[in-house]
Image: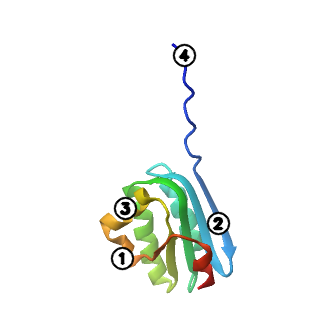
Amino acid sequence: MTDSPVPEPLAFRVDSRDVQGASVVEVAGEVDAHTAPTVHDAVEAAIAPGARVIVDLREVSFLDSTGLGVFVTALKHVREAEATLDLVITSARVLKVFELTGLDVVIPIHEELPPLLDS
């Protein structure tokens, strides 16, 4: 019997940067009970009065209910700050989570980041 190499999981990563006046939070990997607090902290740090917050989830491979809770909380805080929140999602699996809960109706979801920054 030969050992098969175990594939490396997608590395979890969160990066924040300012792009054309927007606070962009880029997330990669799985967003679950273990990693959601890191995403929460990064998104909350981007929220300020009148801010434009964009969370780029194009490299997210999985999002559970804990991860979804991050965006419910963020939406509440964004509204209180009179800011905006947009998500960028290309994974059908991740998008389905937002659709099943109806969050796709209250949080704008886009497929690309550059056109979003031009608007």
- As shown in the figure, which amino acid type bears the numbered disc 4? Thr
- As shown in the figure, which amino acid type bears the numbered disc 1? Val
Q: Earlier in the sequence, mark 4 or mark 3?
A: 4
- How many neighbours does mark 1 have within 10 angstroms: few (below 14), some (14-19), or many (20 or more)? few
- Spatial separation of the CA atoms under disc 4 and disc 1: 50 Å
Residue pointed to by mark 1: 105
Q: Earlier in the sequence, mark 2 or mark 3?
A: 2
- How many neighbours does mark 3 have within 10 angstroms: few (below 14), some (14-19), or many (20 or more)? few
**Residue 12 x/y as whole percent:** 57, 50
**Does residue 50 sit above or below 19 in this rendering?**
below
- Spatial separation of the CA atoms under disc 2 and disc 1: 25 Å
Q: Residue at x 59, y 67 (%)?
A: 25
- On residue 2, the disc is 4
Judged by depth in the image, the label closer to the viewer, 4 or 2, is 4
Q: Residue at x 37, y 61 (%)?
A: 96
Residue pointed to by mark 2: 16
**Does residue 61 sit above or below 55 in this rendering?**
above
Which SS class for mark 2?
strand
**Residue 85 x/y as whole percent:** 50, 77
